[in-house]
Image: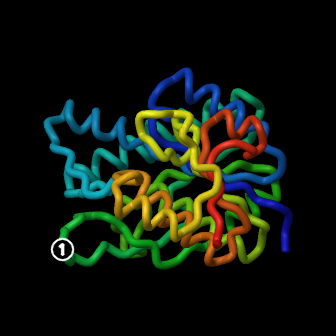
Amino acid sequence: MHDRLTIVKVGGKVVEEAESLSTFIKDFASIAGQKILVHGGGRSATAIAQQLGIETQMVEGRRITDKAMLDVVVMVYGGLVNKNVVAQLQALNKQAVGLTGADLDLVRAVKRPVKDIDYGYAGDVVAVNTENVEELLTNGVIPVVAPLTHNGQGQLLNTNADTMAAELAKAFAKSYRVQLVYCFEKKGVLANAQDDDSVIPNLTYELFEEHKQSGVINEGMIPKLDNGFAALKQGVSAVYITNTDGLKKGFTTGTLLSHD
């Protein structure tokens, strides 16, 4: 078993706004030990798609990815957002490398089967290859991972960034003591969406299901928490939902997911 590994997924307004992203990068860089950053960028993808006249369709926080939208997310996630984050880490003298799931065969996926909804070129993860990235981590490199996967036959796929982070966390938990952190603009999971201070400090799966049924927890928070609880069940030592201030304070604020 290696040392502790912190996997942080950052998304929402934190990624979209230059000032908040800069603050986040500094706080992320200060986290002790080995770390991996997984980023979103959905709002940027939506904005650029709109400029190109491409319609965005979402179902329960998950993007429907037709061929035109796949081209957009590859450009935005794998290029614009990813390299901007890498450059900012380099500016802090942190060795970083931008990756997608296709690089180093890191994450393989299959096109999501059509059931009630056709999600298009959305990828469901089937395998994570940690070996090459472990070498990077050992050499002090920070992998910055965009939420794109591949099917091993040349096809890129769009994979939910929360899912990507959870799948990486589960795979690396076989070799590291992994803590998974979902970082966005809110202080944590809120009991009242209109009150930014109504943070639920400890969230069990039972309470999550109750809040989901009542509508307290909805939209993009659902896949985030589904993935977080799945990671806990498969060996990840801790899962936090917090903001950049939570990173700075060593994950003592925000929402901690728990089994009980």
**Residue nearest the observer in this picture, 240 or 125:** 240
Q: As displayed, is residue 3 above or below residue 24?
A: below
State the residue in front, 121 or 21. 21
Q: Residue at x 50, y 56 (%)?
A: 100
Task: Identify the residue at image location x=42%, y=40%.
Answer: 193
Q: Is residue 260 above or below residue 121?
A: below
Q: Which residue is mark 1?
A: 116
Closer to the camera, 136 or 57?
57
Farthest-out residue, top: 19
Is residue 48 at all visible to an observer of this figure? yes
Percent from the top left, x then y, of residue 117?
19, 69
- The quarter of the image holding the N terminus is bottom right
Q: Dividing the image into 4 quarters, which one contains the C terminus?
A: bottom right
Left or right of 230 in this view: 73: left
Front residue of 243 and 38: 243
Place of residue 190 in the rendered image (x, y in percent of width and height, measured from the top left): 50, 45
* Vertical order, 25 against 102 (above or below): above
Q: Position of residue 89 (x, y in %)?
A: 67, 34
Residue occupying image coordinates x 83% and y 46%: 32
Q: Left or right: where does residue 260 sit relative to residue 2?
A: left
Q: Quadrant of residue 234?
A: bottom right
Q: How is the image coloured?
A: rainbow
Report if residue 104 is visible in the image: no
**Which amino acid does the dot numbered 1 rest on?**
Asp
| Element carrying mark 1 | loop
Please indicate whether residue 42 sits to the left or right of residue 165 in the image.
left
Q: Residue at x 48, y 47 (%)?
A: 191
x, y percent for residue 107? 51, 68
